[in-house]
Amino acid sequence: MLIRLSPDDAEVYLPWLAAQRQAGRTVVIDANLRPSVMPNLDLYRRHVLTALHYADVIKASDEDLTCLNLPGADALAQAKNLLNGSRASLLALTRGAAGAALLTRSGQVFTARETTPVTVIDTVGAGDCFLAGLVVAMLEQGLAADWGSAEVQVPIAQNLLGNAIASATLCVMRRGCVPPSRVEVLARVQQFPCVFGL
């Protein structure tokens, strides 16, 4: 697992990502920027953007997008620019308490957020759990690597977002990074469904 897309490791991860894409595997990349530990921020940004070029699915936070200096008046506009500048079919955007969004290559945008107040204990691992919830839901739905390149069905997109948000929510309600089980995620989706927007 790549903790950060450091330029120092680019000669390892860039050929590996290219090989996965060439082999027809679905490539999922979390931008996961850590600027505080990178001495050359411009070089770091360039390497992250290069790595994201190999992704079928990109996950980014609003903070990641700010760090990447992408054009756009808000996180959603920045996410659209990132997706349009990549080869990905799907981009998942996390926005903290404001919820999350899915953007597709075909131009659809789906948003969702929790409907009930959440007591946040610890945010460590929230992004990882969000992405895990998304990927598990994609696997359960049997979605292809290019899902999102053509118009997608609303219920499927909402299912992906709901599972991802539930997974992240359960994580932040606990001390430390304690990923929830699949049973716990499904129970939360059922008990506390998100409110969705289009």
Image (cartoon, helix red, strand yellow):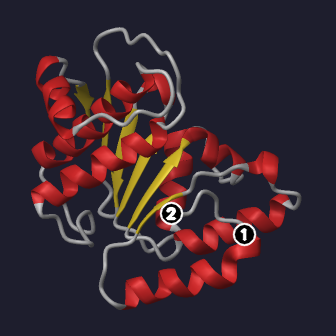
The answer to whether 38 appears left or right of 149 in the picture is: right
Which is nearer the eye, 118 or 122?
Answer: 122
Residue shown at the point (41%, 19%) measured from the top left = 173
Q: Report which quarter residue 197 is drawn in.
A: top left
The answer to whether 11 appears left or right of 184 in the picture is: right
Residue shown at the point (49%, 80%) measured from the top left = 17
Residue shown at the point (48%, 65%) measured from the top left = 84
Q: Is residue 190 above or below residue 149?
A: above
User: What is the three-letter code of the residue carrying label 2?
Assistant: Met
Tell me if mark 2 has few (under 14), some (14-19) or many (20+) residues whose alpha carbon lies within 10 angstroms of its own: few
Q: Position of residue 85 (x, y in %)?
A: 53, 69
Q: Secondary structure at mark 1?
A: helix
Q: Position of residue 138 (x, y in %)?
A: 21, 56
Inspect this view and state whether residue 198 appears: no
Give me the disc on residue 1. Answer: 2
Which is nearer the eye, 36 or 124?
Answer: 124
Q: Report which quarter residue 189 is drawn in.
A: top left
Q: Is residue 163 above or below residue 24?
A: above
Q: Is residue 11 above or below residue 1?
A: below
Give me the disc on residue 2. Answer: none
> Which residue is identified by label 1?
46
Q: Position of residue 6 (x, y in %)?
A: 71, 66
Mark 1–mark 2 CB contact (< 8 Å): no
Q: Report which quarter residue 115 is drawn in.
A: top left
Residue shown at the point (42%, 21%) measured from the top left = 174
User: What is the three-letter code of the residue carrying label 1?
Assistant: Arg
Inspect this view and state whether residue 3 appears: yes
Q: Quadrant of the C terminus?
A: top left
Q: CA distance from mark 1 to mark 2?
A: 20 Å
Q: Earlier in the sequence, mark 1 or mark 2?
A: 2
